[in-house]
Structure formats: C-alpha cells, structure tokens
Image: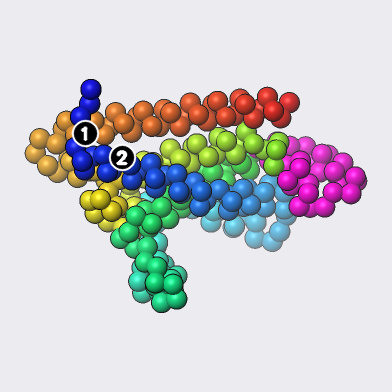
Amino acid sequence: MIAFTAEETDAIALSVRVAALAIVVASPFAVGVAYMLARWNFRGKVLFDALIHLPLVLPPVLTGYVLLVLFGRHGAIGGRLEHWFGISVAFRWTGAVIAAAVMAFPLFVRAVRLSIEAIPHELDEMAASLGAGGWQRFWRVLFPLSLPGIAAGTTLAFAKALGEFGATITFVSNIPGETRTIALAIQSLTQVPGGEPGIWRLAIVSVCLSLGALAASEWLTRRALRHRR
C-alpha cells in the first residue's frame, strides 16, 4: 500500500481538478474552432490555423509569460476581471486551469478537426437538401459523426493538461495547496534531499492517470465508432 503525504495528496487532487476543468473550459471552443477549420473557407485561414497551434511550438515558459501579461492584475484581461468582477486568476488554481486549457487546446482542436474532415461533404449537402439549416446540420449530422474525434481529443487534452508544467509554473508559480500540481510537486521534490520516494510515488500516479486517459480514449473512440456505423 502506497502511503502519500498530505502535500502529495493535495497535488494529485489539484491536478485532476485542473485537468478536468481545463477540458470543460476548452471543449466548446475546440469543437467550434475545429468546425471552422474543417468546413469554412475564409481569408487568413492559414494564419488562424497557425495561431491556434502556436502553443505546441512555442516554449511553454513563453506561453505562460504571455498568459501572465494578459491575465495578471494589470493585464489587458486580468485587470478588467479584477476591476469589474473582483476575479483574480494569476497565482491562483484558476490560472492553472487556464494555462492547462491553453496548452491542451491545439491537440483537442486537431483531433476534432481530423474527425470532421473525414465526414463526406455529401452528407451536409443531403441534409441541406432536406431543409436542415446550418445549426441543424451541425448537431444532427456532423456532431454525432465526429464523436470519435471528440472522444480522442478530450482524453488527449486531459493527459496533456495533467502533465502541464512550463506554462503553469510561469503563470501561477508553484504554491503548495494552491497551484502545486503533480508536475510541480515532482519538480519541488527534486530540490529536496531525500525526495526520491515522493517523486516515485507521484510518478506512479501520473503514469496510471495517463494510461487511464489513453485507455478511456480507446474505449470511447471504439464506442463512438460503433454508434457512427
């Protein structure tokens, strides 16, 4: 039986909560952006696509710094949130949710986009010929058929959010009980003499959670494919 310290338990619980909420925050935007990229043709589409995938190629620390500039107390977004609603996200666990959602967003979009692009355009045309509007075609045709991609994107994004480090530590720091996720807790333990047992305990949990997410992705994808057929 593995015995976790209170700080390790807090880090595990916070990681799961942050990753889950990051998916909740990102999912409607990811599906909408994926639909735009898969089905719409508009000026600047290539640039828009590049901007969406930018967090994948930028150093995570730079992404975290940009979030800090935007969502800090004096940032363009964070300052207004603080002034109008009294909401502060910098150096809070809510900021960790934002950082995780931003880093996982490109993977989510890509999985859903590929799924939508695999749906023949003829189905859209058939639904339109039967009088279905754009919103109806999306909900009754594209959304059900793209469920495998949505399932895969959800679990991939969850796994990515679960292990996020660079953007999180830059944006919200490494505060015990507030922003210290599994990845940050492992980094802290590397600086402490005798921290190896704690590192291994958290590593085992991280691997189990990631494998569980991948297994869930496979199960959900197969289930959605059977439903699609």
Q: Is residue 57 visible?
A: no
Does the magenta-highlighted stretch encompass residue 131?
yes
- Residue designated by label 1: 4
Q: Residues within 10 Å of mark 1 (few under 14, many from 20)?
A: some
Which residues are drawn in magenta? 115-142
- Please tell me which of labels 2 and 1 falls first in the chain: 1
In this picture, residue 94 sits left or right of residue 44: left
Report helix, strand or loop for mark 2: helix
* Residue beneath the point at 58% across and 53% down: 29
Q: What x and y, as percent, mark residue 190?
A: 17, 40
Location of residue 44 (image quadrant)? bottom right
* Residue beneath the point at 33% across and 45% down: 14
Location of residue 163 (image quadrant)? top left
Q: Is residue 12 visible?
A: yes
Q: Residues within 10 Å of mark 2 (few under 14, many from 20)?
A: many
Decide: is 200 above or below 102: above
- Locate the C terminus and report the quarter of the image it occupies: top right
Q: Amino acid under label 2?
A: Ile
Q: Main secondary structure of the magenta part?
A: helix
Report helix, strand or loop for mark 1: loop
Q: What x and y, as percent, mark residue 162?
A: 38, 41
In space, the residues marked 2 and 1 are separated at their CA atoms by 10 Å
In this picture, residue 165 sits left or right of residue 140: left
Residue 12's disc number: 2
Q: Amino acid under label 1?
A: Phe
* Residue beneath the point at 34% across and 63% down: 90
Residue 205's disc number: none
- Locate the N terminus and report the quarter of the image it occupies: top left
Does the magenta-highlighted stretch encompass residue 191?
no
* Residue beneath the point at 57% across and 43% down: 110
Q: What x and y, as percent, mark residue 10?
A: 27, 43
Of residue 105 and residue 220, the one placed in the foreground of this image is 220
